[in-house]
Amino acid sequence: ENGVGNENLHVVKPGDKINAGAFKLDFIRVNHSIPDAVAIAITTPIGVIIHTGDFKIDHTPVDGQVMEFNKFAEYGDRGVLCLLADSTNAERPGFTPSEKMVGQTFDEEFRYAKHRIIVATFSSNVHRIQQVVDTAVKYDRKVAVIGRSMVNVVNIAKELGYLKVPEGVLIDIDETHNYTPEKVVIITTGSQGEPMSALTRMAMNDHKKVDIMPGDTVIISATPIPGNEKLVSRTIDHLYKLGADVIYEKSNGVHVSGHASQEEIKMMHNLVRPRFFMPVHGEYRHLVKHANLAKSLGMPADHIVIGENGSVIELTKSSITINGKVPAGKVLVDGLGVGDVGNIVLRDRRQLSQDGIMIVVVTIDKESCHVVSGPDIVSRGFVYVREAEDLMDEARDKVQAALDRCEENNVSEWSAIKSTVRDSLGRFLFERTRRRPMILPIIMEI
């Protein structure tokens, strides 16, 4: 979609080894909720660093490609300087269930569903989509795909052989009307309640091609990402209002995580046996939990470092430390400017949006510092001037009084006059309205 050319892309697969400058990279197969997930073992001049990437240990993966335990153990035997490991599920005890468990749940739900079935999941989870297709074939249902990213992924996965769909099973969404509801499965995006996603638009009765009908079974095969809970709950509520039967709780077995739980994390540490450790992938609390797990396995506290975005990690043969910070995080693009809108500008915009602006214009004689004209007050987004004439008159009087004080005290510095006007008017407006508009005094001289 972004026009990235193939000339700079180098395809690698598990088992490949490449050189990159002073480094040698070895790609090791792991299990995750996307195909072809790999960890990387990086051989550097001072030792080996292993980055697990997102991983779980799945002994019965849908594609049959089991994680390469032997490779991690071999590196562990040779000696690993530092391990960077996935921390997403570091709070969860036990093991993460196999992806095949979701297939068993789909089998039960499809067996008892009397009407149309709609399954919402992440478009990147090709194994989950495969299990929906397999179950649909078993119960003689046709499969339609909806949602831009889902359609793209399904087409590409079929083309590359990652998704195996028997001939005649996949139909266009427009063809679903040619089949009775109990013969149709729709795979869609929107498992996170995204406002413009296909499932959310169905729930709001706003989709051009699919209307939710009483008796439909909607399976939300995903867990809300932290922060999306409200959006997902709202979507579920709307689906229920339209008469659908919604299956969404993880306890129902319609979703399993793609990340390792505590026992799998411990197994990774015991296979690799690194000298130093840095938890990655997760909120800060997950990193701390993962660090505590490493300590429970006998790693000294001073061999563990918890970084944040922007932290510079300095790793030597004998130590690991945080050594400074670099700018990191969100960069705001506004018009043609990139990164030029900082905290101060955003703070001003927020104040303008909440309390408005008040401009005070006054003309002062340069020699005598006497007010020649004004003060005139212009207000935008603060009060409706025509209905607040008394307030504006009082505000004008307060400004005049402040200017008189400056004249009496022979204050000739414009910055001091502006500050006095701003403070005096700001106090008055807050006392009267409990608002703090942005006040811009403008002084002209003659």
Image (cartoon, rainbow, N blue to C red):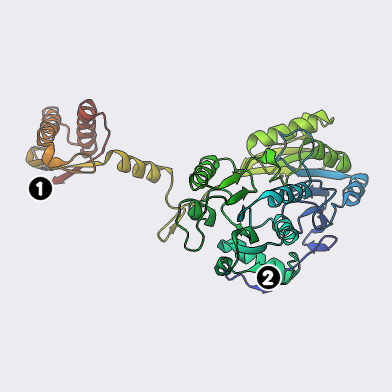
> Residues under labels 1 and 2: Cα distance?
64 Å
Q: Is residue 25 above or below residue 80?
A: below
- Give the residue at mark 1: 446
Check disc 2 and report its element: helix, strand or loop: helix
Dot 1 or dot 2, earlier in sequence: 2
Q: Position of residue 16 (x, y in %)?
A: 84, 63
Foreground residue among 424 and 77? 77
Q: In the rendering, which numbered label is found on residue 54?
A: none
Foreground disc of the pair 1, 2: 2
Q: Amino acid at mark 1?
A: Ile
- Give the residue at mark 2: 8
| Left or right: 57, with 393 as reference point | right
Hey, which quadrant is residue 360 in on the image? top left
In this view, the residue farthest toward the top is: 431
Hey, which quadrant is residue 433 in on the image? top left
Picture residue at 62% right of the left edge, 49% below the top: 219
Q: Position of residue 168 (x, y in %)?
A: 70, 71
Foreground residue among 322 and 84? 84
| Left or right: 409, with 209 as reference point | left
Quick check: can you spot residue 326? no
Picture residue at 76% right of the left edge, 38% below the top: 261
Foreground residue among 146 and 224? 146
Asked if disc 1 and disc 2 are in contact, CB closer than 8 Å, the reply is: no
